[in-house]
Amino acid sequence: MYKSKKILLLGSGELGKEILLEAQRLGVETVAVDRYEHAPAMQVAHRSHVIDMLDAAQLREVVVKEQPDLIVPEIEAIATTALVELEDEGFKVIPSARAAKLTMDREGIRRLASETLHLPTADYKFADSYEEFVQAAKEIGFPNVVKPLMSSSGKGQSVCRTEADLEECWKIAMEGGRVQNGRVIIEEFIRFDSEITLLTVRAVNGTMYCAPIGHIQQGGDYIESWQPHDMTEAQMNEAKRIALAITDELGGYGLFGVELFLSGDKVYFSEVSPRPHDTGLVTLVTQNLSEFALHVRAILEFPIPEINLITPGASRPLKASEELAEYSIAGVEKALAMPNTEVRLFGKPVTKMGRRVAVALSSADTIDTARENAAMALECLKVEK
């Protein structure tokens, strides 16, 4: 007999909103937590709390008060030391406190992938100061990619093309990091043909993979995704090998977004998120079970018989171009006039420069048509004062 559970969601953005909706379909009691009021997931949760999730005492207080069956992180910026302690006390963290801690910053997961699991990655170095950063960038060579150790949606990421860009790239990393600790990662710039997300699910009945999702990033944040992305059999086998190795090492149940670079016949590991991925929003219109439904089934320890790609599809996020305390989204009716197209408005209370506020999703018989329709739908949408 299935007994209803309680989920405490840490981070309540648009991805968390979809997680809670899927959880509620299975009778789960839901509690949303974030650092600001009226976050998207809070609008559908049974209850919500506003705390500083990097404050261990505040995090502990809300967990002890709610006594959840499952603690489900939706973002990286969480006091992971508190999660480790809470897990030791008997609370269940998804997929585990260790996984949350390792993937919270790029150093832990990169060292695990490259130095422990010996997976193919770009060359990299870390730096704690501007002087160390300059030296590391010169040793890696130009161009290189600079990222803060912890950020979300590509914030703080830039390409350092020449020595003249060093100061600006350091400034971007310092301003974009979720925690201002001054430490950055400098990566070799891989001249890849494409980059993909391989959504990987660890469930009670084994590890499964969604069809690969192609995506384009700009400033470290995705601006388009589509599914499926064309890959050779050899590339797919190598992608699955890498995804299996990293997710087996992280352990636990749930969906993981494994980011990979495809360069010729080579596949490189980039990053992994132990939770639904923003590029995976496209699965809302392409699969029998979206990435959110898969995540919820897996963490509730329900079997997943199969993952089927029903139709090709594409997504295009709408981003705000300025900070607004009040805003509206125009053109929804025009976007919805596009064939096989959906628009999801996230309901974020305010906008910031580059903040995602909606997404256009289109399905079609071919990837090209789906991408064209999603692009045209996005053209219809405007953020207005």
Image (cartoon, rainbow, N blue to C red):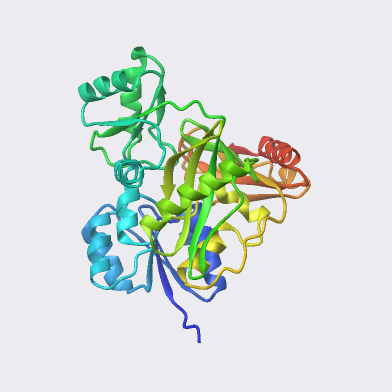
In the image, taking residue 164 as reference, residue 226 lies left or right, namely right
Residue 313 in view of the camera: yes
In the image, taking residue 78 as reference, residue 235 lies left or right, namely right
Q: Which residue lies furthest to the bottom in this view?
A: 1
User: Is residue 283 depicted above or below 383 in this figure?
Assistant: below
Q: Residue at x 49, y 33 (%)?
A: 322
Q: Residue at x 47, y 83 (%)?
A: 3
| Residue 347 rendering spot, x and y as whole percentages | 53, 52
Q: How many labels does the image show?
A: 0
User: Is residue 115 depicted above or below 96 in this figure?
Assistant: above
In the image, taking residue 242 as reference, residue 93 lies left or right, namely left
Quarter of image, res 303? bottom right
| Residue 310 rendering spot, x and y as whole percentages | 71, 56
| Residue 239 rendering spot, x and y as whole percentages | 52, 45
Q: Depth check: 330 or 203 in front?
A: 203
Q: Residue furthest front?
A: 234
Residue 44 in view of the camera: no
In the image, taking residue 201 as reference, residue 184 lies left or right, namely left
In what quadrant of the picture does the C terminus appear? top right
Q: Which residue is drawn at 46% across and 27% down?
A: 190
User: Is residue 1 depicted above or below 268 in this figure?
Assistant: below
Q: Which residue is drawn at 33% across and 37% down?
A: 177
Q: Which residue lies furthest to the top in this view?
A: 164
